[in-house]
Every structure is written in structure tokens, then in C-alpha cells.
Image: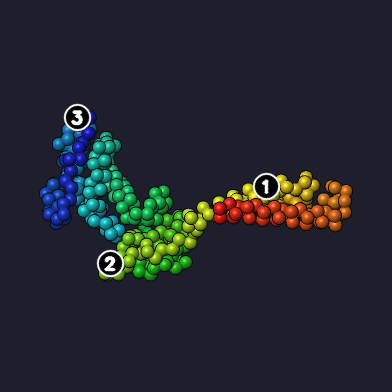
Amino acid sequence: MTAYSPNFIVMPENNLSHYFQEIRKFPMLTQEAEYALAKNYKDNGNVNAAHTLVTSHLRLVVKISMGYRGYSLPIGDVISEGNIGLLQAVRRFDPERGFRLATYAMWWIRAAIQEYILHSWSLVKMGTTAAQKKLFFNLRKLKGQMQAIEEGELSPEHVRFIAEKLDVAEGDVIHMNRRLASPDHSLNAPMRVDGEGEWQDFLMDETESQETLLADLEEMGQRRTLLSRAIKTLNERERHILIERRLRDTPTTLEDLSQHYEISRERVRQIEVRAFEKLQKSVRGALMEQVGMARN
């Protein structure tokens, strides 16, 4: 079967009134005529039959599209997307199943329009799960029923009602309501009429600069190198006691170390202090050496 080309479809122009007048010229089809055309296209690939099926349902696309006027998108573009959904429906329609094309096409038209709105309404990606789509396209209607369209933040009672009605989490309702109430704004938009200054000029990055992070990493690396070299100047017992007492998250007790070396706790403390002093002296000496080399 030859695929029906989208070139046959009538797309809305800039003058929507003219488009509406033109599509009214296409006659509505009786059930018998619709069946014969759909059968001819399905069995023989007759594109003229498909053209007639499409044009006779363009008014259905307009009717469905008008229900999506509240998303600040050009209605002509919404109708165009709905027409694409109609094309998909005609291609897949099976007249032998016993129902009318309009009944079958409504799902394809709505799906195409909703997909377009989800991808065009916000630069920030919207949720595309079934629950999120249902919330996106029903929140405005439910708010209208509760007369809460202009109230900004929803009351806890309204949030609870919508969440139960749509079987979604209350947090999702709050988040989606804020998304719908706050359209995208460019960070390059001027803050004043004279065009001087953009919103991004006033954004502050609380994180450290790359230069600071790099300097900190280099300094930490130097400290580790100096510490590693200084520890090697200690004898084995001094090194072990210093590590156990000063470099562990949970220091080993004097009692445990005194039992390990079979010496008094006071003696362990003296070795710890002496090892730490030797460590400091070694590190200071290495730093002084580095400073001297830098000056030369």
C-alpha cells in the first residue's frame, strides 16, 4: 500500500480565518462513504481516497485544538500538529473494526498536540510519564472548577483534592502548579528599558573559583608530601605511636599502646610529644628550604 503523503494535507496559514473558511468547504462523509474510501485506501493505496478522508476531518482537528488555547502557543501551530496526528490516524485506520474514523482519530490528534505542547511550552524539559502528562493537561481545568486559577499557590485542600482526583503525589501537584505559573525567562534579558545590565549579571556563584580550588589542591598535595617525608625521619616506634595517637579518626588510648610496648602510659605520652616536635621541626625545615629556593 502506498503511504499517504503529508503534502496532501491542508495546513493553516497566517490568516486563520481564511483557513477556517476553506476547511468548511470539505463535505462531511456518511458512514457508508467513509467506509468505502477507507477500504479503497487500505486495499489499493488510493491517495485520493486518503485525501478525502483527511480533509473531511480537518474541522475535528480545529475543534480539538481550540481546547488547548491556554498554553500560550500559536493556535496555528497547535492545529498543524493536530493535522499530523490526523494523518497518522488515517494511515492506521481499519474500517473493518466497525467504528468511525473520527472516534479513532481523536486519540491520535490529541496525542500529537499534547506531545507538541510538552516539548514547546518550556525550555526546561517537562515530565513525560503518563501521570505527569495527565497532571499537566488537567491541572488548569481542575483549578478552574475550584475557582483557583488566579490564586497563585494552591491551598492544602486544593492540592489534596487534585492529587486524589488525578492519582498523583501532592508534591507533584505543587511543583507542576509552580511550573505553569512561572514561564521561562532568559538570563540575557535586560533588566532595564535602556538595555544596560542583564539578569545573569546578578547571579552569584557561591562555589570556589577554579583558581582557588586548584591552589587548594596544590597546597594539600605539598602538605602531604612534606608530611610523608617528615614521618620518615622518625624511628619505627615514634612513627607508630604518632600515627595511632594523632592521625587516626579514633585515636588509640595510651593504655593500649603502653601494653603493646610494655612501657608506662606516661612514657608513651612523652614519645608522642617528642615525635610530634620532631615532625614539626622537619616540616618547618623543608618549608624554609623551599622558600630559599624560590628566592634564588
Name the element at disc 2. loop
Residue type at mark 3 is Asn
Q: Is mark 1 on a helix, strand or loop?
A: helix
Q: Which of 156 and 115 is in front in this view?
A: 115
Identify the mark nearer the N-term, 3 or 2. 3
Specify how the rendered protein is coloured. Answer: rainbow
Say above or below: 51 vs 159: above
Give the residue displayed 42% in from the left and 66% down from the top.
154
Q: Which of 219 and 142 is in front in this view?
A: 219
Vertical order, 10 against 48 (above or below): below
Q: Is residue 105 left or right of residue 225?
A: left
Residue name at image x 39 percent, y 55 percent: 135
Query: In this figure, which residue is indicated by the disc labeled 2?
Result: 195
Q: Nearer the viewer, mark 1 or mark 2?
A: 1
Q: Which mark is residue 44?
A: 3
In the picture of the structure, the residue carrying the numbered disc 1 is 229
214 with respect to 40 (left or right): right
